[in-house]
């Protein structure tokens, strides 16, 4: 249930198509739905600008599917992150789309895309996080451009795309290993930058921790940092910023 | 040297008040000034939307003052972070202002303030980081509102200020200890939120590390996280977002 | 062998139904039973208010079953934590109950439930720890109420249950990720609160460490913290407190 | 403002000594007082069973004193933790008491002491945390018994005091280094045990972290663990438990 | 090739049964054997009192077997640690013995056992490390007594065995979780104590790190600490001490 | 495309066999090839002395093969690290070689070997990293000598090879566990030493972290340290040094 | 009160010089003395072979002196570790000796020295820990030989002292930085080796943690490891081993 | 005593100016000098290409001076790192030079400088480490060029100096915070690169640990990494490489 739906209720009420009591009932309709092991927060979109999203990793397959169906019934759309092809098959919903690179399942979402979010990766191994961000932001209604594999070991690959950066309203940079790309990009633009450390690497990459700390210590001030591999969060934040008028 | 100055050069050129050669010279004027131990990056404002700022902590008093004077000569303004009252005295510049709560010294800065950045702290001990963010964002040209000491142990203090949150274009939340305030604020708004972990606390607060990780793991998606006590970075990011049109 | 059994021996002795020598023998009966690789501590209930419990994770299937049978013979009841469905099948004891959400196997336990322990979780992924606590406390004789999925991203879900909190004698809160729920609950009640960090999350959740440290640093004073995923310990402590008269 | 004060308002109202409007006004009186850099939470006692306490470590001397005076005016009592003799002198309040071993300053507090909290330390170096717990619990209205320097290297010292443990309603154990004392005490009693790791030790004691983790991993189930050196929190929790009827 | 063999060469030389040249040749016989990927150190027993032992974990099955055979050829005995039943089967050597609890494979070893090493465990899950120590020390020629499952949660189990401790020349204590048992044992004896932290536990036991640090911080001075799960090292050290005359 | 190829273009131009325009085109030919998910950096050899290498661990099998083929087409050679036998089979390229000990796949590479790199390991378990270094350096054109299993527990094994060390131009030392070998070797030579910590060991070896830190703290000054198990990096650095004239 | 004193009581009893009742009284004389903030454990020597020792670091000057005097009165000797020259002056006891390199104060102690403990350091900065071990072991009655500054960067310095190692009954090795010396010494002897990591070094020496972990991972099996800078513990353990007959 | 001195002895012997016995004696002259608390390793230069250097941080002022004088007497030169102005004054040696930026004291050293080492810093705060490297390498006989304050936030500052990089034989890069500069430099050159992480930064820079790990994880293969702030080690390694012919 998004802002448009709310506005419709209010418009209908104003126009006399809906009684005040009925409108109240619809609006006051419990903001979450209790399905015993989960309280689905249908009003979250209204409060936070982002609907409740199903994080599949910590749940059983049965729980994920039951929550997804309850959401679909209410709002006609949902987003599942850190899912698997197996969950997708068990869902048995034709209109759902499975994004294999990030393991996201989406159904519905905002159709009109606006603004411009540019998403960069340092290497090929950072694509899962970047794709999760891209699918999320697009689902929420943001236009997205992706540029992959432009890490600092060969800076000319990035320089060639300099024009694309200028057109961005906000930039997401996903990088593992030493996590240096956000600093370099940050030195080239005045746009807000969201850095996503990824778990690409081995040994002292510590599953992304080194990239995370490098990003938090960037010599370019004002880079927003996300949790490791949290493309979903980056997509949400980019959309929040991209939606500012 | 900011965008307005550049535009003026271009306008003057177009209007014939400045020869192309002269304009070129001014523009190509070395983007940084070499004072041997430091290369001052006068064009940074142009590229990154934020001028180069003097981080005093790792420098000798003499270095800080020499860089500050070089900046003042070129641009008529500067910002020094993590400074001390002693440095302020040695500077001997009347128009410079010392902000004792955060240790920032500012001179000049943008006069017209626009947009609206709301800055919250969980406790009294988080004020230094919040003040650094406030002074920075204000210096860059953003309007700032501060609400201090509204932590989660007494949520009603925050609830009373709910209206102020709605008017924010972007929100900064500084918190130490368990770092829970950004999650609670994030559940109440659709604005971009910038979380600044502070070193307030003791024992397993690990000098802010616990708050940092708590913020990175927020169950509210899309919270931008900064380095510990990095109010300056939060001010820069907030200003970048606040400047989006 | 619990306090009631001891009292019976003493009563029988006083009433002449048991000779002093015989009573002594029964009481002095080795407080633990040596089955070579394990010394079962049958008197632990008497000393600590909680019987010895079988922690299955570090033991072979054969060891777990052999200890469970020895306990059953002596006391007619046992509790096995971190067990699997496979162990349950191999046990082949009809009256034993397998709790799939937490992997606990219970047989017998106190029938009269008293007091009131309220158990909350922040999300669906925290249920295993919460269920372990619930089964344990109930086995020991405490009445238990559970409220799941009321995390801080949608505080209204918790506010709706405020009345239930008031009726609690002690409250258990299980949360992963940023571990903020205990602080918020702690700000609403004067009851003892037991916080259980869970391993739900990824990246810098560090398998529950972030939630653990956040809880230890709560700005609400006096929150009891348990090891990660240690629902069993929370159940024991809650029962100890719930049993105070 | 504690429960007794509230009850008095209600009684006065019932008895006609106070109009309903007046009572409402008193009760609704802003639950916190805004002194700009701090919002004092006068109703916290009512909600959490523990009044707001001033944690001096992160505040300037001037802030601590200003908050303490505001509290004194409202409630006639206050508690300041991690304070110094210097703050005590600057306070210039005759009735305030300075506890040098823990650095606590107290004024007023509950006069009737009830229940029984026993506080143990492993060594002499653990006394500061234990004393902070003792002063806090006593201030809140709990009777307290202390037994210091009974660590596991000489267990007979503890065995001699076994009777005192039996009379406790709740037990606090402060220990640094390997943090083993709570496990040994926990094996001897069925009372709730609150373990406070202290920063006593050097090298791999990691300022109390080793003791903290040892306590979280106790083989005795159901030990409540506090942050390092957090005697104040232990005192609050012990009082919460000690107050259960 | 052990000291006895060396002495025989020298005796034979003295007695004229062996020419000096021949003796020299035998003694100078390369102290290690080069089998290309490994240099087997046959003289290590002579230098260090402990023969080279095959640590199977980091090697391929083929490597382990090839080294074992080369050792067997030279010295008639070997010890393989962290091995598996599969390696044992592939070895196809009748006289080799597989110890399933610790995964050690032994063949030969010293037949006369002397001295007395007592090995304790806190719980059943600590037996693998204890068994590795027992097999190792016994292989090297030490007499060994084991007492398992006598952790601090039920100290009477240990008290009952007090007499056995008095007869020990050196004591090994294996414990996971909070690792408190060595401190308690250390308080009861003047024998050298070797503490082996084990990986038994979960959450903040950090795979044995908490027990390790607790042992290093024991309030009983002079406890020798080993790497996590390093029963082999404990067996070697105990044997070195047990061999002192 | 290496320096020889560039030189040929320039020679051909000078000799009139190639027009300046054509030469320019060939040289300006995009320095990387865009295959959508990867930008292959064909000029890297020219810039960095080492061609772009395929790190297989973070990529899908299909991605690895597609990049390898693109590289083969352009330069007639490639190197894949952290690969598997399965990838090798799927590649279906006869001239490619699979190095099972390190999991490297190589095709082509420099034929003339020059200089002399000596590679040592402390134990058998360190061979994978050493072999990766050996294959890499050899591929790049360096002559390589390997000496395995000469750790500090039996220093005579190293002493016997002292002559080989003297002939080295640069030395690589791979060691896990306590990582002491580089210090000992460093005390015996004036050649540059590259230390590769390996993940061999268990418990507090922390997957190679202990060896890494030991190497960084060597009392012999000037030892170059690599990431854990990074034989590839060691091979590259050794080749860079070995190529200095 | 040491074993000799006990034996005297028993001899006197046997010889009729002391009544059984009187002997019992003397022996049963409280095993510790209660001076309120400390329980001095006078029987510890009897139980553990080492008397209770005063660890000054965590205590006030007044506490240290009061405990030292109580010990002196009972046993005529004491040992204070991690003390300062200032404490020594305040003690005002002529017969006490201050050891400035380790900060130990000793008075009395065993006069007959027996056995042979050899103590090595890698560098000059490791002497404080080594001296603490030497003073402790000597106080307890062991003969001690010290060899300082023989680290692995110049192994010939150690080789020259090889004969001294052979005469040792037990060897203590103190080393900071990479902590490699115990492994090298361990490869040369069959004596028990006690490794003391020291906090010498900087950066990733982590105040001794790197040396500690290196020692725990020694490729030489059976090295006893102590806490960082714990020369006292090493002295106690060495004496326990040195006292074995 | 350096190689030239040795060669002279050999030449004199060959020419008959020195008897073989006398030559042997001079050469065999004890390779270290025993001044009781330190064994000065005068032959180290011969073995390792770098003379023994005095690391002042862990030593008393008196020790430093005594060792420096002993070295001066033997070789006429010395180098002291991590020293202070105070030590310099106490030395009272006119020809010694104090380098205030790095705290190095040097006397003598190689006069002919050869090769070319280029040393870069990311910021002004990284100069101490860079200066230590420069002084060390110069002392050993390498020619050095320094370029300071060219970090990744303003890459054009580095681009301007590209020509200088091409002329380097080996490059040292000192950087704190996110440590990204070595990767960017590494992408522009085929020279060996030595990365020195510095402790510049705050919060999650962890005193240089973040920069260290970032450098170890560089996406440019073959970067040599040093301990934090270890400019001395970088200078030694650079000189070792720079000396290769």
Image (cartoon, coloured by chain):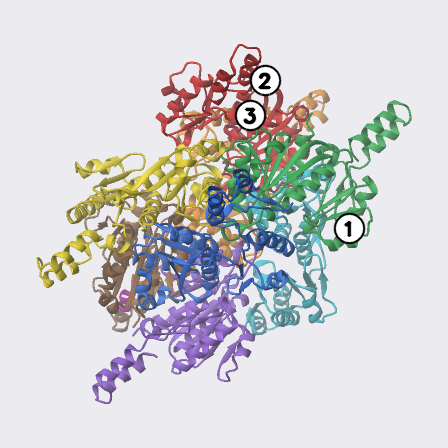
Chain colours: A orange, B cyan, C red, D green, E yellow, F brown, G blue, H purple
Which residue lies under the disc numbered 3? Answer: C49
| Disc sitting over residue D65 in the figure | 1
Left or right placement of residue E204 versus residue D67 in this view: left
Given the image, what chain letter belongs to the residue carrying mark 3?
C
Regarding residue A189, the answer to whether it shows in the image is: yes
Regarding residue H220, the answer to whether it shows in the image is: no
Secondary-structure class at tag 1: helix
- Do the residues at pointers 2 and 1 share their chain? no
Residue E105 percent across, percent down from the top left: 25, 39
Residue G96 percent across, percent down from the top left: 56, 62
2 and 1 marks in contact (CB < 8 Å): no
Lower sequence index among marks 2 and 3: 3
Q: Nearer the viewer, mark 1 or mark 3?
A: 3
Out of H174 and E121, give the one closest to the viewer. Answer: E121
Left or right placement of residue H138 versus residue F120 in this view: right
Out of A89 and G142, give the one closest to the viewer. Answer: G142
The quadrant of the image that shows the N terminus of chain H is bottom left
What separation in Å lies between label 2 and label 3 (alpha carbons)? 15 Å
Residue F219 percent across, percent down from the top left: 40, 64
Given the image, what chain letter belongs to the residue carrying mark 1?
D
Q: Which residues are magenta?
A: F2-7
Secondary-structure class at tag 3: loop
Residue C245 percent across, percent down from the top left: 66, 23
The quadrant of the image that shows the C terminus of chain H is bottom left
What separation in Å lies between label 2 and label 1 (alpha carbons)? 49 Å
What separation in Å lies between label 1 and label 3 (alpha carbons)? 46 Å
Q: Give neighbour class at mark 2: few <14, some 14-19, many 20+ (Cα, 10 Å).
A: some
Q: Give neighbour class at mark 1: few <14, some 14-19, many 20+ (Cα, 10 Å).
A: many
Which residue lies under the disc numbered 2? Answer: C113
Residue B139 included in the magenta stretch of the image: no
| Picture quadrant of residue A222 | bottom right
């Amino acid at each position: 249930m998004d802002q448009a739906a709310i506005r419709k209720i209010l418009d209908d009420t104003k126009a006399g198509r809906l009684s005040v009591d009925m409108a109240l009932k619809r609006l006051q309709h419990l903001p979450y739905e209790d399905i015993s092991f989960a309280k689905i927060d249908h009003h979250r979109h209204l409060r936070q600008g982002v609907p409740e999203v199903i994080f599949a990793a910590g749940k059983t397959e049965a729980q994920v599917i039951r929550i997804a169906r309850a959401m679909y019934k209410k709002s006609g759309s949902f987003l599942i992150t850190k899912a698997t092809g197996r969950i997708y098959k068990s869902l048995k919903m034709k209109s759902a789309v499975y994004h294999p690179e990030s393991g996201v399942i989406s159904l519905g979402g905002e159709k009109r895309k606006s603004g411009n979010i540019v998403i960069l990766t340092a290497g090929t191994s950072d694509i899962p996080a970047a794709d999760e961000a891209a699918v999320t932001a697009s689902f929420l209604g943001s236009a997205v451009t992706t540029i992959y594999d432009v890490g600092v070991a060969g800076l000319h690959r990035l320089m060639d795309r300099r024009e694309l950066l200028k057109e961005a309203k906000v930039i997401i940079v996903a990088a593992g290993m030493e996590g240096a790309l956000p600093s370099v990009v940050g030195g080239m633009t005045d746009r807000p930058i969201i850095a996503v450390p990824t778990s690409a690497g081995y040994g002292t990459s510590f599953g992304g921790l080194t990239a995370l700390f490098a990003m938090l210590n960037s010599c370019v001030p004002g880079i927003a940092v996300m949790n490791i591999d949290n493309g979903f969060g980056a997509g949400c934040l980019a959309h929040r910023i991209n939606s500012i008028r």
